[in-house]
Amino acid sequence: MRVVTSEERVETRGHTDILDITPRVQAAVSKAGIADGLAVAFVPGSTASITTIEDEPGLHADLRAALERLAPEGAAYQHDRRWGDGNGYAHVRAAVLGPSVAVPIQGGRLMLGTWQQIVLVDFDNRPRTRRVVIQVIGE
Amino acid sequence: MRVVTSEERVETRGHTDILDITPRVQAAVSKAGIADGLAVAFVPGSTASITTIEDEPGLHADLRAALERLAPEGAAYQHDRRWGDGNGYAHVRAAVLGPSVAVPIQGGRLMLGTWQQIVLVDFDNRPRTRRVVIQVIGE
Amino acid sequence: MRVVTSEERVETRGHTDILDITPRVQAAVSKAGIADGLAVAFVPGSTASITTIEDEPGLHADLRAALERLAPEGAAYQHDRRWGDGNGYAHVRAAVLGPSVAVPIQGGRLMLGTWQQIVLVDFDNRPRTRRVVIQVIGE
């Protein structure tokens, strides 16, 4: 059993930008040489999340519409009143979706469904360069 | 330290069907012979999730009602317009709840609360046979 | 590779009380003497969650407001009709946010962002003493 940790940089446009990071996670698994185990993708920061979705433009719009119901971009936030950041909605969305996803590995491959991708979702109200931590545990 | 990965098949009715898979996860932990470690349950696919809940019919209805507020089954989805699947709501709900849960193991037992069960939630708009991956890491 | 599991007790006020547990998780990592690996924080029970957020009072109010849209404290719940607990909203919120978070460790430190804390969120409708399981896997 070993643990191999690496980092990727991802350029985002913010405003609930959804980016497929599956190839990068799979590359980290392959490079680590771990056949059986667990891959964890984690985003440091409090205005982005990692989850899985079918990565196609229709669902990008649909996920944004649902999160507008939960935490509208234009609503009044105590966070914005205190800190003036204008990204209170982004913090709330990130806390609900969570910062990480864990995907089992078998035969050196992520055990994802055919139409299931690992995505970074950047909720912040401006473009960002995001670090994504990829950790592979196994043998 | 070892990692043991297995798969289960679960028959679902779709439409946010909620199924207790705790006995299957506990059986996989017991079969793996791992006393201390982590159990991860993961569903491959983009229209189902795994989480924990008190598994009783009242809460099944309550969780469905809340998710109707977030991503109504009858709303207009870009995904459905492009692909004609009619399950845009299911993709959105699955992305918010996430595909996996991780539960610590001590003395060979899942460290769940008394009223806390691991459930597969199938959001799709038709019955499905779902694969659930159960991975046990520990010693 | 080793796995080290410990428990903490946290006093909460309920009603979506949000408590920073990062110092306790970091202390468990340090005590375990694990430099590279994964820390999992898990709450046994079906009316609390663990996630990450910037821990400041404005966002506490903002997260509560968003969860009021998803699962209002004063709405009618089947769970409450059947069991009379009055905490149906708490079960629903906990199922959506999930019971655990996984954070990579490097050089003995949690790889969190500068403004990102690990928080226990207690949704129940009364003060509770919560157990939090902290599991550290690595080498």
Image (cartoon, coloured by chain):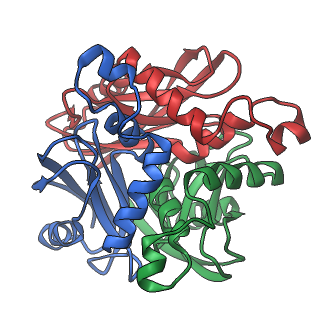
Chain colours: A green, B red, C blue
Decide which of C116, C71 is in the foreground and name it.
Answer: C71
A118 vs B97, left or right, is right
Residue depicted at x 30% and y 14%: C82
Q: Nearer the viewer, residue C75 or A100?
A: C75
Question: Residue C54, can we see it?
Answer: yes
Residue C112, horizontal then vertical, whole percent? 38, 75
In the image, is residue C124 above or below residue C132? above
Q: Using residue A138 as the reference point, say whether residue B38 is left or right of it.
A: left
Residue depicted at 27% across the width and 75% down the height = C35
Looking at the rendered structure, the number of numbered marks drawn on it comes to 0
Q: Position of residue C31 (x, y in %)?
A: 11, 70
Residue A53, percent from left and from top: 67, 48
> Please, is residue C83 above or below residue A86 in the view?
above
Q: Is residue C5 left or right of residue C58?
A: left
Quadrant (top left/top right/bottom left/bottom right) for the C terminus of chain C: bottom left
> To which quarter of the image does residue B48 belong?
top right
User: What residue sits 60% from the left and 60% below the top?
Assistant: A72
